[in-house]
Structures are given as C-alpha cells and as structure tokens.
Image: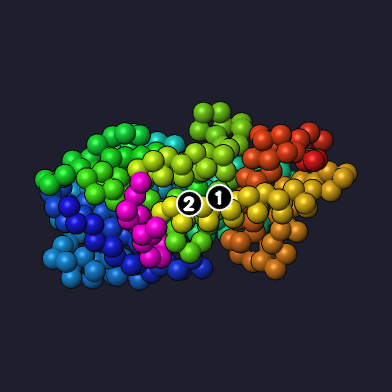
Amino acid sequence: MQIIPLSIPTPFYVGDVNVYLIKEDPLTLIDVGPKTPEAAEALRTKLAANGVQFADVRRILLTHAHEDHCGLARQVRDEAKNAEIYVHNWETGHLFGRLSQDLHKRLLLRSGVPEAVFAEMRRLYDEISLLTDALDDGGFVSLEDGMELEFESGSLRVLHTPGHTPGSCSFAREANRTLVCGDCVLKRITPNPIVSPDPVDAEKRFPSLAEYLVSLAKLRTYKPTLAYGGHGEPVTDFEEIFNRYVRAIDDRQRRVLSLVNDSGSTAFDVAKELFPNSFDHDVHRFLAISEAIAHLDYAASEGKAHVEIKQGIEVYRK
C-alpha cells in the first residue's frame, strides 16, 4: 500500500495541509483541504498528476473536522457521486461551525472570557466556517476505534486519538508500522488542545490535554517507523518527538502554574500573560485561551491547582 502525500495551500498561519492519497481500490483520500478555490485547484492538479480525478474517489477519511482538513469533503464527495465520508461521531465541525452553539459560549464565559471578546471570536469563526461545507446528519460513516479499513493490498486500522479535538483519529498501517496522524503528531509544532464541549456530557469541557497525552502514549505502543502528520514533514523518529512533546507540555505546565496568582486567576487571565504578543491577533486569541484552559484543567486533575466557581466564572488557585 502506497500512501502519497499531497501538500495543499490553506489561508491559515500554519501553512499547507497534508492530504494523503491511497491509490488502490477503494481509492481513498485522508483529509482534503479547506474549501477555497486555490485548495480545490491544487488538489485537483496534484491528483491528476497521479492519474486520479475527483470522480475516482470512493472514500474520504477525515482525521478531524477542522476547516483546513475537511473543507472540501462535500465537494469531492458530490463530484465523485459514489464516495463516502468517514469521520468520528465525536467531531462536530462538519455539522456546524465552532463557537456557533450556546454550549461553546457557556464554556468560554465560564473561563473568564468577556462577552465582547467572545463576540469578536465568534465573528472570526463565522468567517472561518465558510471554508467548509456542513454535512447533514447521516451524511457520513462514523469512524470507530479499532475499525479495519480494507484495501486491495492491505488495511488501515482506525485509532481514536482524542486531544486536539474530541474525535481526532489516526490510521495505522500495521504491516510496516506507518501512521497517518492528522494534527496529533506534527514534526515542528506541538498541537493545540482545542477547547470543546465533552461529547458525553456537553455541560462539561472535554479534558483535551489529559486525553492528548493518553493518545500520544497509545500511538507510541505501535512503535511507528514513519508518522505522517497534518502539516509539515513526516516524522521518522517518533520516540524523539514523543519525548520532546512531553518535555514541552511539562514546561508549559510549570509556566501556566507560575501565572496563577495568590488571589486566583481565570484561564482568560493566564492566556493573556502566557501569549502577550499574539493574544489580540486573529485566531491566536482563541488558541491561546484553549491552551490555558487545557493546562489549568490538567493541573487541577493532577492536584497541582484547584478551581472554584465565583459568580459563574472558574477561578484557579495553587
């Protein structure tokens, strides 16, 4: 089984997204890129260079439902006419935009985000949501952990690897210990644990950082020789990346806890101190808040901090 990487442009600061072509029956794409004319043209051109058209695609596997990864899914499916989209049922970005539901608002306001700041972030994500076409309920097949996806010369094992998002999935080619990891493993940056409602209890936040660490350890058990990420070059030394991630997370934990003051701090307070130079820039503010929330939640779960609710807002103390 040959996994062919295709680099597709995005309008985001992270740069190009990696789409993966598996050119055997059933012809499969892993991720598709954002819904922009530039991405659609690049995907069409790079598929054509491999002797493939949109109409040939039979299966679209989504590592997760962020716009840079899933945006063109419906267009490719509709042009193919006989393709199915697969995504974990804990993902929601393919059904409605991030921050578009009251659940997201409640979770962020509880973290100390002012109403005006949430409104600004909501407007930004309303624009970003235009980079994907929403799918209807029933318009996709649910990916399940351990599911085997068969091809003419082998198979991929579905691995539920939550953290970056609740429904993030990776795909393992066990025969040669190759992984396709989406944004779970990236060579040059540490993935951001995005704030999300818990799929089991939507009134709670998903424990993104704790789950991410479990997912990393799960991937490590496969002793991968090659890991394809959602952005950048493939990883050929998974153990080095694993240890670098763990060190970076430990360092960030210490930094976050150092920013919690004696009188108590909200996640919003910590985010402003943690990323002072990028906090007011576009999507970076939401990512900064997500990072602070994830680390404070993890610190609380490990007994390094405790949280109390004051007038509906979570306040953390060491």
**Secondary-structure class at tag 2:** helix
Give the Cα separation between the discs numbered 2 and 1.
6 Å
Please rate how many residues cluster around mark 2, counting C-alpha atoms within 10 Å: few if below 14, some from 14 to 19, many from 20: some
Q: Position of residue 191 (x, y in %)?
A: 51, 54
Side of 255 relative to 216 (left or right): right
Q: Main secondary structure of the magenta part?
A: loop
Q: Position of residue 13 (x, y in %)?
A: 51, 68
Query: How many marks do you count on the picture?
Result: 2
Bounds of the magenta span? 223-237
Image height check: is 27 above or below 278? above
* Residue at the image position 42 percent from the left and 40 percent from the top: 218
Please rate how many residues cluster around mark 1, counting C-alpha atoms within 10 Å: few if below 14, some from 14 to 19, many from 20: some
Q: Position of residue 64 (x, y in %)?
A: 41, 48
**Secondary-structure class at tag 1:** helix
Looking at the rendered structure, the kind of residue marked 2 is: Phe
Specify the quadrant of the image occupied by residue 125: bottom right
Q: Position of residue 187 (x, y in %)?
A: 44, 61
Say if residue 79 shows up in the picture: no
Q: Nearer the viewer, residue 189 or 224?
A: 224
Q: Are marks 2 and 1 in contact (CB under 8 Å)?
A: yes
Q: Nearer the viewer, residue 148 or 243?
A: 243
* Residue at the image position 73 percent from the left and 38 percent from the top: 304
Say if residue 283 shows up in the picture: yes
Image height check: is 143 above or below 287? above
The residue that mark 1 highlights is 246
Magenta region includes residue 68: no
Q: Nearer the viewer, residue 269 or 234?
A: 234
